[in-house]
Structures are given as C-alpha cells and as structure tokens.
Image (cartoon, rainbow, N blue to C red):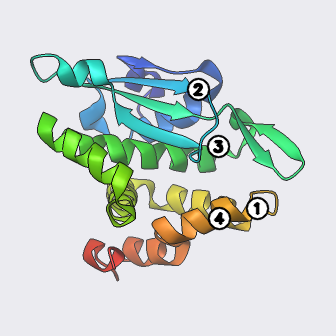
Amino acid sequence: MTNLSSYSWRKTIPEELSKPILKALQHYPTLQSREIIFKYSRKAGSSIMKAQPNLKSVLRLGNDRSYIIYCSKTLTLGDETMAMQDLPQTVLTGWFGHELGHVMDYESLSKWGLIKFGVGYIFSKKFVKKAENRADRIAIDHGLGNEIVETKNFILNHAGISEKYKQKIRKLYPSPEQIMEIIEGKETVDSMKA
C-alpha cells in the first residue's frame, strides 16, 4: 500500500481534511506534480465545493498550471451545523474525487479552452450539466465510483440538507443509480448527457 503522504507534494491541504483529500488524490497519479491548493471558501455560495484553475497560473507563460479547490468549512443540516471534517470519510473522499475530476478535465484544455469553459459554465445550464457529468465520469474511471455513490446518497438522503440543494443535485448530476450502471458498465458517458 502506498504511503498517502507521497500524494501531498505541491499540495496545500487543511490538516483536518488531509486523509480524505489524500485518499482522493491517490486515484489521480497524473496530478501528483501539479500544485493544488485546497482551502476553505470565504463566503457561502450555492456550491459546497468547487474546483477552478488558479488564474495567475493560467496567465503565466508555460504550462505549469495550478488549481484551487474551495470547500465550505461547515455544512448546514437543518438546525445543525456540522464541520466539514466531521462528515463520513468516504463521503468526503467522493466529494474531493469529483472536484479532482474537474481538475483532470481542465488539464485537457488549452488556455483559450479554459476561458471558453468558464463562460459556458456561467451562462449555460446545459454546459454545467455536461461538465458535472464529465467530472463524475472521470472520478468513476479513476476508481472512485463507490465513493461518488456514497456522496450522492448522503446528499440526497440526509433529512437536514435543504431541498433546494437536493434539487440542484438531481438536476445537474447523475443519480446514484446511473453511477452504479456506469460502474457496472451498462451506461456510457454519452447517455448521461441526455
């Protein structure tokens, strides 16, 4: 078994989230040399986590990109607020695995491709759905299918998570059943785009 700390090179990781982040990173060996900053988001938004290229690295000459994965510090579950690190480890590994799927997607794009991606993500729900499906598929292809299912089930079945957020997940992301079909090889990425 590989030592998880070997995946921390060029990574900035909050100590309390290091185990699930490193577990997710071990599924993406091609990202081992990339700088990735995992940090808590300063403001609450519609996303609990989000990955994006570090703008400074995109504008630099050369191909040494870096990425930032923002994470909410807490998750509101009805009347209760839970620290992110207190979520089940498998759920966190799946969540970070999905965000790293986005990073892998960004890796395949040119600088102009990244700009086009950003514009599409801001202005087109159809584009967002395709991007989120791709990130899940990339995570599944990298061996994180079960963790992705755990994450989706946690979100969709937890009574304390707002119905508005659950609706967003149902609308933009593949369902746990679709993910299981992909894992079992019954569905292709193209049929997820529909």
Instruction: Check the picture and name the quadrant holding the C terminus.
Output: bottom left
Regarding residue 13, the answer to whether it shows in the image is: yes
Pointer 2 local density, CA inside 10 Å: few below 14, some 14–19, many at least 20: some
**Which residue is nearer to you in this view: 188 or 159?**
159
Rendered residue at 45%/61% (across/down)? 145
- Disc 4 residue type? Lys
Residue at which label 4 appears:
166
Q: Position of residue 131 (x, y in %)?
A: 33, 57
Q: Earlier in the sequence, mark 4 or mark 2?
A: 2
The dot on residue 158 is: 1
Mark with earlier residue (2, 1): 2
Which residue is label 3 attached to?
Answer: 89
Label 1 packing within 10 angstroms: few (<14), some (14-19), many (20+): some
- Density class for disc 4 (Cα within 10 Å; few <14, some 14-19, many ≥20) is some
Task: Identify residue for label 2.
Answer: 40
Q: Residue 54: percent from the left, percent from the top?
A: 33, 25
Numbered label tally:
4
Q: CA gap, disc 2 to disc 3?
A: 17 Å
**Picture quarter containing residue 28?**
top left
Q: Amino acid at mark 2?
A: Tyr
Nearer mark to the viewer, of 3 and 1: 1
**Along the polypeptide, which appears first: circle 4 or circle 3?**
3
**CA distance separating discs 4 and 3:** 20 Å
Looking at the rendered structure, the secondary structure element under dot 3 is: helix
- The amino acid pointed to by label 3 is Gln
